Image (cartoon, helix red, strand yellow):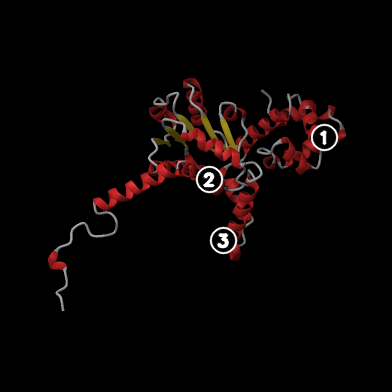
Amino acid sequence: MSSIREKVQERFASLPPGQKGLVQKILSNYEEYVFLTVNEAASLLNVHKSTLVRLAQGLGYEGYADFRFQLQLLFRQEITPGQKLGHSLADIQEDSLYEQVVETEIQYLKESRKSIRTEDIHQAAKMLLSAKRIFVCGTGPQRSLADLIEFRLRRFHFDILAVTEEGRAIFERLQLLEKDDALMVINYGTFQKDHLDAISIANEVGCPVLLLTETVAKELADGATLTLAARRGPAAIYHSNIVPMAIASAIILDIARMRAPEVLSSIERLHELRRRYGYTGEPFHRDPADEEPAS
């Protein structure tokens, strides 16, 4: 199959002048468009969304979604982790580094409100609440987020398992998936084959899939029951997990809100167990010899 660059080269001469300039503009900064919807891309380019659809069809694609998918493939092939870090370092001012980081993350968090609705958070929480068991799949940079979700929901007395293995080891966990369970997949950046396999197994057994992502890759989104997608910032920079952590925290808090009596009871029981076995900050055994004599 031809790459998008080859497609453009083959069909460039037959494109109308306006489309020639448009596709050149997109390809010169394609990392800015790989995670945008057709409406967002059209707004950024100051054109109507139908113009982008016609461009995609003029290049031989079904529509803009297929065109964007080819941009994503190009991004995965050409943008390396080192380049992302380099782009970020180029913008950093030494004397205001922390302020820049904070302001940048605030900007991305505010942007996420445009694509993540409160009703989406409610739906995600209800999906996890109705599951017999929860499997949270996160690898690489998202491994810590999967571990955090497992930690929080286990405290609420949920039967939850973080799936952070990669390669063949992941099947040790995924073979336990059943229809009454729920699979939560955290996939940011390029989509992972392990995550595709996990979603495929969940679809096979019939359990719902909650996907947290910034990509709109067809392979992942098509298999998900519910997708919560928000960008962590421009595609070609070095990213943090602030945005996905905010989404996960909102889901966890919504679960606690909907099951407040049970959740509070579970946390109190945990505290009582710690107190009973001497883990509340007080010494487990007080030796009388250590007591100071009365004055």
Q: Residue at x 40, y 47 (%)?
A: 264
Q: In the rendered image, which quarter is residue 266 located in? A: top left
Which of pointers 2 and 3 lies earlier in the amino acid sequence?
3
Q: Residue 179: name its quadrant.
A: top left
Give the number of the disc on residue 210: none
Q: Residues within 10 Å of mark 3 (few under 14, many from 20)?
A: few
Which quadrant of the figure has residue 118?
Answer: top right
Residue 201 at x, y = what percent? 47, 24
Instruction: Return the x and y of residue 249 as percentages of the image width and height.
Output: 51, 46
**Can the viewer see residue 195 in this picture?**
yes
Q: Is residue 188 visible?
A: no
For disc 1, the marked residue is: 20
Where 77 sits versus 293, above or below? above
The N terminus lies in quadrant: top right
Question: Upstream in the sequence, badge 3 or badge 1?
Answer: 1
Task: Single out the mark in the foreground, 1 or 2.
Answer: 2
Q: CA distance from mark 2 to mark 3?
A: 25 Å
* Residue that label 2 marks: 250
Residue 192 percent location from the top left of the image: 52, 33
Give the amino acid at mark 1: Lys
Question: How far apart in space, not on screen, are marks 3 and 1 (Cα)?
Answer: 41 Å
